[in-house]
Amino acid sequence: MHSNNVFYRGELKRVYPIMDRAEGVYIYDSEGKKYLDAMSGIAVANLGYGIKEVADAVTEQVNKLPFCFTVRFTSQEQEDLAKKIADLSPPGLKKVWFSLSGAEANECAIKAARQYHVETGHPSKFKVVSRWQSYHGSSMATLSISGAESWRRGYAPMMAEYPKIAPSDCYRCPFGKNYPGCDLDCAYDLERVIKYSGANEISAFIAEPVVAGSAGATVPPPEYFKIIRSICDKYNVLFIVDEVFCGNGRTGKFYAIEHWDVVPDMISTAKGIAGGYIPLGVTVIHEKIYDAMARGSGKFVHGVTFSGHPVGCAAGVAVLNYMEKHGLVERAAEMGDYLMKKLSSLTDFPMVGQVRGKGLLIGIELVADRITKQPFDPSLGVSKKISLAAFQKGLIVQPGSGGADGVRGDHILICPPFTLSKAEADQIVEILRDTFKEVQKNLQKT
Ligand SMILES: Cc1ncc(COP(=O)(O)O)c(C=O)c1O
């Protein structure tokens, strides 16, 4: 029963159904309605719901040790999870910092970058470059480095103005070019911005390898991150990858950046790392950054009360064990290929401009005109209409807007649990087909 006391997220006037229980890829509300969760919550329930091994690990940990103040102690669970994550990480990324969310994981990374430069004799470096159409969190610092206009606009006067570069979006190239004849201007934009701002002030560059919620699963070309890495090296700028959404195996590799065969200086992750059983944020830090702090001031002046929470760490270990035991990273690749192929059949709708993504992180760009790629009028709220109609039919997908130029552009995002079956994948496509049919018909009437 609704209490009238909750300050709801998002749309305050909406009456939210009460989510009662969940099993596998399905959610049931308090009225008994069943939904196929093609969003894994929001890239969180990557194993699906109701995994007994993880629930048991959490329960056992709550009974054994519910809290550990990590300024005074470490815990075996923190040690074990750090080792597991370091073993899964690229060479040199061996130090693991725990927090509770994606925003906190990114805050840790940008503060560690700043401290690294101070410790190594470059105290003027503090600015973090990021990309337009990006999202790195809702705290003031992570919103400052985010480039998604609709999230930023209201708080813009309060933000630190950090430089932004163009997004890498081959469907709507910001330079009006076509890959591969484009000279990768989107990557070299980083060098232009570093030169304009002064390399002596730039501390780090942050990017999502596959841009999820803010752009609808855009995937940069194969050369992109190698160029980014070389520019970062040239100007002593640390390279942070935000894998909060696209990491944890979702794209068919444990970290999405592995598709580009590039080693970053820091990786932040959260969401699915503990499968949604408990909040957990993770920043994986290159040894060179840790060593600079250890040799220099001897400490990292940062932290939150619940850093290294033993229950979160126990859940993380159980999730990684389960993923390994069931080959879920490989399954995300396999089911991603299957779902992508099936979803590509939706391009027979004139409103579907592109189906794109990697693994089980898939975006569908919606357009008013497929030939000219003209976006819909934002006042039509097309992606919202699609997600609401799908929700009514028992399918959960995520709407997104502003991907074309900050204001215009509609997409929907799909990122189901890695345990999705082929029959469930077919069901997603079937419901979406009905949804597109319905929304397209209604749009024709307006
Ligand atoms: C790419 C990315 N980074 C960071 C965040 C922030 O994570 P959190 O909401 O856990 O703070 C999100 C959240 O959606 C995200 O998608």
Image (tube, rainbow, N blue to C red):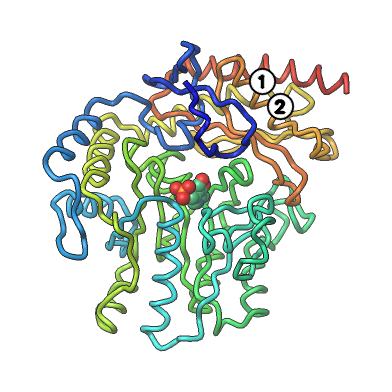
Disc 2 marks a residue whose amino acid type is: Lys
Residue 237 at x, y = what percent? 50, 74
Query: Can you say whether 320 is above or below 56 in the image?
Result: below
Quadrant of res 64: top left
Query: Looking at the image, can residue 373 be seen?
Result: no
Judge by depth and name the residue closer to the eye, 264 or 26.
26
**Which residue is under mark 2?**
385
Does the CB distance between marks 2 and 1 fall below 8 Å?
yes
Residue 24 at x, y = what percent? 37, 20
* Mark 2 burial class by Cα count in 10 Å: few <14, some 14-19, many 20+: some
Left or right, 57 with respect to 320, comes to left
Question: Which residue in the rendered view is the most extreme toward the bottom?
Answer: 121
Number of marks in the rendered image: 2
At x 34% / y 47%, what residue is drawn?
Answer: 280
At x 67% / y 14%, what residue is drawn?
Answer: 434
At x 40% / y 32%, what residue is drawn?
Answer: 45
Left or right, 174 with respect to 47, comes to right
Q: Quadrant of the C terminus?
A: top right
Query: Can you say whether 118 is above or below 398 in the image?
Result: below
Residue 175 at x, y = what percent? 77, 58
Query: Looking at the image, can residue 262 be seen?
Result: yes
Residue 110 at x, y = what percent? 45, 67
**Which residue is under mark 1?**
389
Question: How far apart are the alpha carbons under marks 2 and 1?
Answer: 6 Å
Quadrant of res 112: bottom left
* Mark 1 burial class by Cα count in 10 Å: few <14, some 14-19, many 20+: many
